[in-house]
Each structure stands twice: as C-alpha cells, then as structure tokens.
Amino acid sequence: MLRLVYTLLWGVILPLALLRLVWRSRKEPGYRRHIGERLGRYGGLSASGPWLWVHAVSVGETRAAQPLLDALLAAYPRHRILLTHMTPTGRQTGQQLYGDNPRVQQCYLPYDVPALVRRFLAYFRPEAGLIMETEVWPNLVHVTRRVGVPLFLVNARLSPRSYRRTARFGGAAASLYNDFTAVLAQTAGDAERYRALGVKAVQVTGNLKFDMQPPEAGIARGHTLRRAFGARHVLAAASTREGEEPLILDAFARWPGAARPALLLVPRHPQRFDEVAALATRAGFSVQRRSQLDVDALDAPITADIVLGDSMGEMAMYYAASDIAYIGGSLIPLGGQNLIEACAVGTPVLMGPHTFNFAQATEDAIAAGACLRVADADALMAAASAVLADEARLADMRAHALTFAGLHRGATQRTLAAVAPVLR
C-alpha cells in the first residue's frame, strides 16, 4: 500500500522534477542535457550487451565504484558496463575515468516510475545490477526483482540516524530491502542495523573506498604544486559544503599560530566555485584559482593566501599538495565526506563533529592516529596549528594515515565474490 501511494505521488512529482532540472540548470547546465534518459528513453545509446549495470548516483559514489568497475571489466571480458548516475557531476566523473573505454557506457537512471523503470530494463536487459551505497528507490528495486534481474546493494551503509528513520516504516522497509538479492554492507555495525530492519541476505564486504588507488600522475602534480608554496605549510579544506566556508574563512582569519599556512580551499560542488571565490575575496584574502594555474609549468612561487581548487577529478593532487586536510561536510550536520582519499596519499586529516556518513571509517582513523576530531572551526584551526608546528607529530600522523588506508583494503574482491554466483 505504501508503494502504491508512493507511485501515485510520482504523478504529481514528475512534472515538478522536470521543472527542477531546468531550475538547477541555471547554475549547472548539465541538468538540461539528456533529459530523455531520465524518462527512460535511450534511443541514441547502444543496447548491445551483455550488460553489468552499476549505479553510482554522484561524484563520491562514482569514485568509490572505480575499483569494482575495474575488477568487473577484468573478470568478465565479454561483458560491458552500464554506468548510471543521477547528477551531471557524477556523469562527468565517470567520463573522466572511463570516457576512452568502449566497454563502459554512461546514462542517467530514469525517475522512479514503474513504466520508466521497465522501459530502462527492457532496453538494456542487464544481467545484474549493483547499486552503490544508499541509493534505494522502491519502484526500481521492486520492478527489477519482478523482471528477474539480480540486484545488489553494494558498499551499503546505514547510519544509526538513517536506521531510526527507516525503521518507522516497519515491514515495508524490510520488504524493500529483501527485494535485493543481497545487501553487501561496509561494516559489521551497518550489517547489524540492516538485520534489525528484518533484512535477511546481508554480508559484510568492507568499504570499497579503501581500494581506491590514487593516480600516480595526480600525486606527482600535487608534489609539484606543494613546492610552489615554498616554506609555507599548506592546510586543505576539501569537499566543503554550503555554510561551511564562512566558518572556515572567519576562523582562518584568526589563525592562532605564528605563521599562517596557505589554505587550499576545494568546494565539493563546481557550481559554487565562483560563489566561494567571492566569499574569500570579501573576507580580505588574496585568492589564486587553480583554473588559472599551469601546475606543470609553475614559474613563480604561489603567494596568495588561498588557492581555490576550482577543478574536477584532482582530489589526489590537492591532498598530495597539503600537509594536513580538513574533510568537509562535518562542521555542519551533513555527515562528512570521504577521508580515505586523503589518508591514501599520506595526508593526515581533521574532521568536525558530524561524521555519521563515515562513522566507522572516522572512528578507525582516529584510533589509528591518522585523524583528529574537532568541535568547531576555531578548534579546527587550533588543531591544525598545533600539528603543523610539531614536525615529529606531523610525520607520525602521515605514517599512520598510510597504514590506516592500507589495512582495510580487500572490499573489491569480497564484493566480486558475492555477486559472482549470479553472473555468467
């Protein structure tokens, strides 16, 4: 009954969703491209498979899926990968990673209307579907099960807060998740919460983000960028979200140490690059934009207070250029972003109080000595100042970051083994 009501609501929501695409395209033009795909129309795309379908809603999920995608391409050489998204930035990230690979095709997933989902499945006829992390659409899951396509929720996470919210739906939530062939959870805590909902087929396979290998070229360019800052330390504020930058800039202006570092400020969403640059300028800082720097031919030191990371697909470079990094989305209650990318290049991290999206990884990183938790923006600057002033402590945290990132690898192979029984 709940799914019926939900489906009927889509009759009202669908026109509004299309209008919202147009509205969002004012700042991000990608939202007005490929609109037909969101309605299940794929006539311009190849239907020639066989297909393994992986859904990665946006940037973070697409990056996290890379080790799994690479493993699937290697393990099933006769298959092609259908990589679906919901956001233009997710699609752009997939294009950067696999645009030259003829075995990977990208498109948008249709809106969660049964007829549109059936049209999508009828066109591509995937052998199996792998949904990344938390992207659970009731009609998508139900229709996929009805037509006999095995569907896995991979790298699945369910925070305590999300569990409490989902548990309110009682048996409906259990029925939804039990339509998956299996839920492959990141941690034992995630698996325990799924089982508490009544989900039967749950396995712990680990976090795919630990298997992400930072590109060597990106690391090398990061080291080049780091040298351009000279004797100054570099503090990164990475994947920052709306509402965080004013807090960070205000606290950075009151830097508690003797020598203020350079701030490498990287907003999470590209449509906000100009807005954040203006914020920093109004706060009285000199700003150098990455898009105006030729990192491969730097012929002068970088003297700006802030370098704005206004580019996509260069997080490895930004982290490699930093001595310590704050991971955004955690000073305000948004749940935080992925800290593993920074640790993988040996950059110690600082996290705010709100890390429910990466709770286990954050606690493990703190226990490993790779991460410090701070209460607010002033505490963030105080912690960064203390670590940067102590070279021995900074070196220890770097070593702990690398060790932490290496200890938790292996989720890709465990995920591959879990889905292998349903694949030819």
Image (spheres, rainbow, N blue to C red):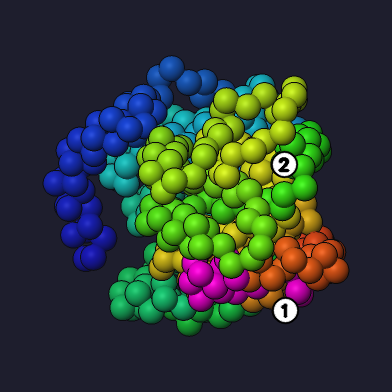
Residue nearest the observer in this picture, 417 or 60:
60
Identify residue for label 1.
367
> Which of the 4 quarters of the picture holds residue 279?
top left
Residue beneath label 2, please?
A: 229
- Residue shown at 57%/44% (left/top)? 305
Question: Residue 49: image x %, image y %?
Answer: 59, 28
Task: Find out whether residue 325 is within the magenta segment.
Answer: no
Give the alpha-carbon distance from disc 2 to disc 1, as whole Å.
31 Å
Which element carries disc 1, helix, strand or loop?
A: helix
Instruction: Return the residue found at the far left.
Output: 12
Residue at 38% x, 79% y is 164
Q: Is residue 131 left or right of residue 362?
A: left
Query: Magenta residues?
Result: 368-382
Three-letter code, disc 1: Ala
- Give the residue displayed 56% in from the left and 28% down from the top: 291
Q: Nearer the viewer, residue 310 or 341?
A: 310
Q: Residue at x 53, y 51 (%)?
A: 239
Residue placed most toward the observer, 421 or 260: 260
Label 2 is placed on what type of residue? Phe
Side of 368 relative to 307 (left or right): right
